[in-house]
């Protein structure tokens, strides 16, 4: 488990203070994920600026199994409101495409700019949908890895 500052990602000590040197970092080892989670929850309550990342034996080669922050933190990228916002932006961009193409069509495609904007809206809307898919896929994989580790801890195959 690693502790870092929520806003700057600077590694922190157990007391919530930055290390004197960038070479000084520490990871805290736990026997179970439940112990690490309990410790992290207590730390973020005591030091609200801390963010705890619980990793497996692979370390930083994989995304963290758990990221624990103070409850007062704003919604993360993985939150349902973030997903809803990405989908609404994509829908708005894709709904603007027919209007922009119609506008240029009415002028016998002499303006060019509306068609250019329409294609950019398509690409940007698709990018937002792809971003949302990627966030959901990453979260699904994280939950599967976390469940596998919890099963191993319980001694299940």
Image: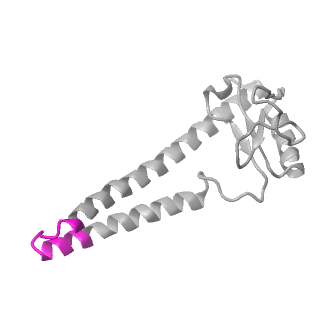
Residue 156 occupies quadrant: top right
User: In the drawing, does residue 95 fall left or right of residue 155?
Assistant: left
Of residues 98 and 152, the one drawn nearer to the viewer in this rendering: 98
Residue 2 % position (x, y): 77, 34
Looking at the picture, the colour scheme in use is: one colour
Q: Which quadrant of the structure image shows residue 81?
A: bottom right
Quick one: which residue is furthest to the left in this view? 108
The quarter holding residue 67 reads top right
Residue located at (52% from left, 62% from top): 84
- Residue 32 percent location from the top left of the image: 81, 30
Q: Classify 68 as above or below 26.
A: below
In screen coordinates, is 105 left or right of 139? left
Number of numbered discs: 0
Residue 152 is covered by the magenta coloring: no
Residue 74, placed above or below residue 101: above
- Residue bounds of the magenta highlight: 99-114
Residue at (43% x, 54% y) in the render: 128
Q: Residue furthest front?
A: 21
Compared across the picture, whether 100 is left or right of 91 comes to left
Main SS, magenta region, reads helix
Q: Residue 111 colored magenta? A: yes
Return the x and y of residue 94 as percentages of the image width and height.
33, 64
């Amino acid at each position: 488990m690693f502790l870092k500052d929520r806003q700057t990602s600077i590694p922190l000590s157990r007391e919530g203070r930055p290390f004197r040197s960038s070479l000084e970092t520490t990871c805290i080892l736990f026997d179970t994920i439940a112990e690490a989670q309990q410790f992290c929850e207590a730390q973020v309550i005591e030091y609200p600026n801390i963010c705890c990342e619980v990793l497996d034996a692979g370390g930083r080669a994989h995304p963290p199994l758990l990221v624990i922050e103070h409850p007062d933190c704003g919604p993360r990228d993985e939150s349902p409101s973030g997903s809803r916002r990405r989908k609404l932006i994509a829908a708005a961009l894709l709904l603007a495409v027919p209007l922009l193409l119609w506008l240029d069509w009415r002028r016998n495609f002499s303006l060019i700019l509306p068609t250019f904007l329409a294609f950019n809206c398509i690409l940007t809307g698709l990018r937002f949908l792809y971003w949302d898919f990627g966030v959901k896929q990453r979260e699904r994989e994280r939950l599967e890895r976390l469940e596998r580790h919890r099963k191993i801890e319980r001694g299940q195959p």
